[in-house]
Image (cartoon, rainbow, N blue to C red):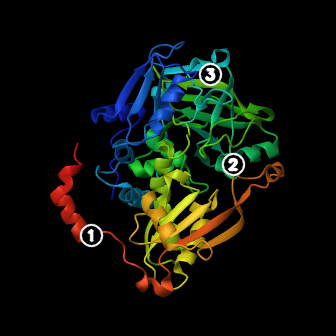
């Protein structure tokens, strides 16, 4: 399926979302508390509208913040997919398009809307934008939640775009945390080893498709601009940063440009993270000295703060990561894979669900172990549940029902020790955390009917597919209203 992406930037995306009635406006909400409160409320359910905050006290009219962009029918629109597809269908269609798209290199242009306003030197003031305090216990204001950082590898000369939280330190300084192993962290560590400042740019608001790709697991040495170009079918247009020379999106809303000094660190955090906890605490992290700010007239900040899952970014990651998980299992030579879902409740990492058609003894165990250690499942995983193919893996109620009725706690659970995790995992003990030992364990739960006597397992108390279809046709009106 070829993607039909009907928008070019954040503003045209807003226009389209408005046409389908999924944009609301709020005036007068404060950055100190109310924008964050409303964002958390919107994230608690799907569907819920996207919201644009304007007339934020202390800031000019038109300096806006958009939240909750990935939800409702906007999910299909944002990914360029037809309406009416369910989550699993969206996952398989988008993943297929993602895998088949041939990268198209980005191209430099001389001008673009991002150059409508350029502030350099003494004019730089990060506080001119209404960065919210997103969560009640956050250590400060975060301008970067729906943002991404642009860096270049000093050895291999390739450009990476990655999503990392960005905290406002003062008028001319921002700090950001990057987990070990992430591509931006690899770049930064190389500059630190050289004792050289790292050129960087931070995009705060832009093309929603590109933002989603920057928080996806794009292969090492592959540029997210090129992937976005491949999905759109044309080169992504960028301008050359005036300070660093880095490629900056020509149609972005706000961009901060500068250098990360390897010797300069400031306290960063705490911040409510994707696990639903303040996992990384307060500690000194590298800072970026902002040398230039670019922004459009009446700029729009894209806010995508993590909440206790499920939240909007987990809803997107589930779409892509679930398809990639199924592909990884099939590429490993495993047969009978009927469905895979990286559950939103585990933020697409901590709970993986796979449905199989059992073909041999040990099939479920094999699938579970491979899922826990393939590229999609290896980082920060916790639980893998393997179920029969009569279970909808995207429906948590069905998965849990299978787990409690078809597994036996004493014989159906395998444990893997010393697996790759993250400092954001709240369950890592303080003594391991102090030593930098960021590892955890994994549970592989076989929730399939026992292979040896599956034919003798009690039948399910549910109508046949044909009977269920006839019931929907005849009595679905009872569910209306």
Instruction: Say whether disc 2 or disc 3 marks the residue closer to the N-terminus.
Output: 3
Query: What is the quadrant of residue 287 in the picture?
Result: top right
Q: Residue at x 31, y 31 (%)?
A: 18
Q: Position of residue 392 (x, y in %)?
A: 40, 64
Q: Which residue is mark 1?
A: 465
Nearest-to-viewer mark from 1 and 3 = 1
Please indicate whether residue 347 sits to the left or right of residue 137 in the image. left
Q: Which residue is mark 2?
A: 426
Number of callouts in the render? 3
Residue nearer the viewer, 375 or 222: 375
Determine whether label 1 and label 3 are within 8 Å by CB: no
Helix, strand or loop at label 1? It is helix
Helix, strand or loop at label 2? It is loop
Q: Which residue is mark 3?
A: 126
Q: Examine the rendering and report whether any part of residue 110 can be seen.
A: no
Helix, strand or loop at label 3? It is helix
């Amino acid at each position: 399926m070829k993607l039909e992406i009907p928008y070019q930037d954040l503003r045209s995306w807003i226009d389209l979302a408005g046409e389908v009635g999924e944009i609301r406006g709020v005036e007068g909400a404060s950055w100190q508390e109310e924008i964050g409160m409303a964002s958390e409320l919107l994230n608690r359910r799907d569907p819920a509208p996207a919201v644009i905050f304007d007339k934020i006290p202390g800031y000019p009219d038109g300096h806006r913040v958009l939240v909750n962009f990935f939800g409702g029918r906007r999910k299909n629109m944002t990914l360029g997919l037809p309406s009416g597809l369910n989550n699993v269908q969206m996952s398989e269609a988008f993943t297929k398009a993602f895998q088949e798209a041939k990268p198209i290199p980005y191209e430099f242009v001389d001008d673009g809307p991002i150059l409508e306003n350029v502030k350099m030197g003494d004019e730089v003031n990060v506080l001119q934008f209404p960065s919210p305090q997103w969560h009640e216990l956050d250590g400060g204001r975060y301008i970067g939640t729906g943002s991404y950082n642009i860096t270049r590898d000093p050895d291999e000369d390739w450009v990476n775009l990655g999503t990392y939280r960005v905290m406002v330190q003062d008028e001319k300084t921002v700090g950001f945390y990057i987990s070990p192993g992430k591509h931006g962290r690899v770049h930064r560590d190389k500059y630190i080893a050289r004792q050289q400042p790292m050129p960087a740019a931070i995009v705060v608001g832009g093309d929603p498709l590109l933002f989603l790709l920057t928080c996806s697991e794009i292969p090492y040495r592959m540029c997210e601009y090129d992937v976005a170009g491949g999905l759109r079918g044309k080169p992504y247009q960028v301008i050359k940063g005036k300070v660093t020379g880095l490629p900056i999106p020509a149609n972005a809303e706000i961009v901060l440009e500068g250098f990360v000094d390897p010797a300069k660190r400031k306290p960063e955090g705490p911040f409510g993270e994707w696990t639903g906890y303040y996992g990384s605490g307060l500690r000194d992290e590298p800072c970026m000295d902002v040398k230039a700010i670019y922004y459009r007239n009446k700029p729009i900040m894209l806010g995508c703060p993590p909440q206790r899952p499920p939240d909007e970014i987990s809803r997107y990651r589930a779409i892509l990561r679930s398809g990639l998980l199924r592909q990884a299992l099939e590429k490993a030579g495993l047969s009978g894979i009927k469905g895979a879902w990286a559950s939103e409740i585990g933020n697409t990492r901590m709970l993986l669900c796979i449905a199989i058609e059992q073909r041999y003894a040990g099939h479920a165990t094999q699938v579970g172990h491979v899922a826990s250690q393939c590229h999609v499942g290896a980082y920060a995983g916790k639980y893998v549940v393997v179920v029969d193919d009569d279970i909808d893996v995207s429906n948590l109620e069905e998965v849990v029902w299978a787990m409690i009725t078809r597994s036996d706690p004493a014989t159906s659970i395998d444990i893997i020790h010393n697996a790759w995790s993250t400092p954001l995992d709240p369950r890592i003990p303080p003594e391991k955390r102090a030593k930098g030992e960021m590892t955890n364990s994994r549970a592989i739960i076989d929730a399939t009917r026992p292979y040896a006597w599956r034919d003798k397992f009690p039948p399910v108390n549910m109508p046949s597919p044909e009977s269920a279809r006839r019931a929907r046709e005849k009595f679905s009106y009872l569910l209306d209203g």
